[in-house]
Amino acid sequence: MTEGNEVILRRWSARIRTADERAYADYILATGLDDYRATPGNLGYQMLFRALGDGTSEVTTLSWWTSLAAIEAFAGADPTLARYYPEDDRFLLDRPERVEHHRVAAGSDVVTLAGG
């Protein structure tokens, strides 16, 4: 699926309570994002929140990878399946079954934010 210097973006989104944003961010930093970092072929990640105005927020994680094989090392044999952790049900209002993968065609370096 990828060749040469292509990069793959993995995108996952779900909803949480807006009041849980900080606690969820702390939880994900210690679980999924640590697992991203520990997987060879991961080039970086971001976690984003978007308040929806109804007491819920959309949470999105973006991660960049060197290959589909690297994503499989993180996610398992079917990399399109979302990977969940034991405490996710405490936060998530929905659990999408699938994630998206995109080949990155153009862009600049990813900016790393302080505190993340």
Image: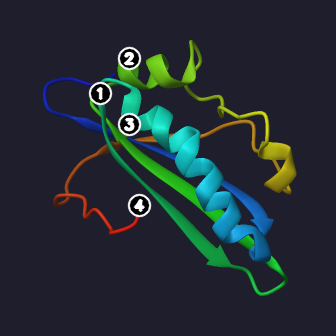
Which residue has dot 3 on it?
37
Dot placed on the residue nearer the N-terminal end, 2 or 1: 1
Q: Residue at x 47, y 19 (%)?
A: 72
Q: Residue furthest bottom?
A: 53
Instruction: Give SS at disc 2.
Output: helix
Report the Cα–Cα distance between label 4 and label 1. 19 Å
Which marked residue is nearer to the observer: mark 2 or mark 1? 1
Would you say 7 lies left or right of 73 here? left
Q: Amino acid at mark 1?
A: Gly
Which residue has dot 4 on it?
116
Which marked residue is nearer to the observer: mark 1 or mark 3? 3
Count neighbours of disc 4 (C-alpha within 10 A) and say few if under 14, some if 14 to 19, many if 20 or more. Answer: few
Count neighbours of disc 1 (C-alpha within 10 A) and say few if under 14, some if 14 to 19, many if 20 or more. Answer: some
Instruction: Give SS at disc 3.
Output: helix
Dot placed on the residue nearer the N-terminal end, 2 or 3: 3
7 or 38, nearer to the observer: 38
- Position of the C terminus, as image quadrant, is bottom left
81 or 93, nearer to the observer: 93
Count neighbours of disc 3 (C-alpha within 10 A) and say few if under 14, some if 14 to 19, many if 20 or more. Answer: some
Q: Position of residue 70 (x, y in %)?
A: 37, 22
Which marked residue is nearer to the observer: mark 4 or mark 2? 4
Q: Residue at x 25, y 64 (%)?
A: 111
Would you say 4 lies left or right of 46 here? left
Instruction: Give SS at disc 4.
Output: loop
Dot placed on the residue nearer the N-terminal end, 4 or 1: 1
Which residue has dot 1 on it?
41
Q: Amino acid at mark 3?
A: Arg
Q: Is residue 92 visible?
A: no
Q: Residue at x 34, y 22 (%)?
A: 1
Report the Cα–Cα distance between label 2 and label 3. 15 Å
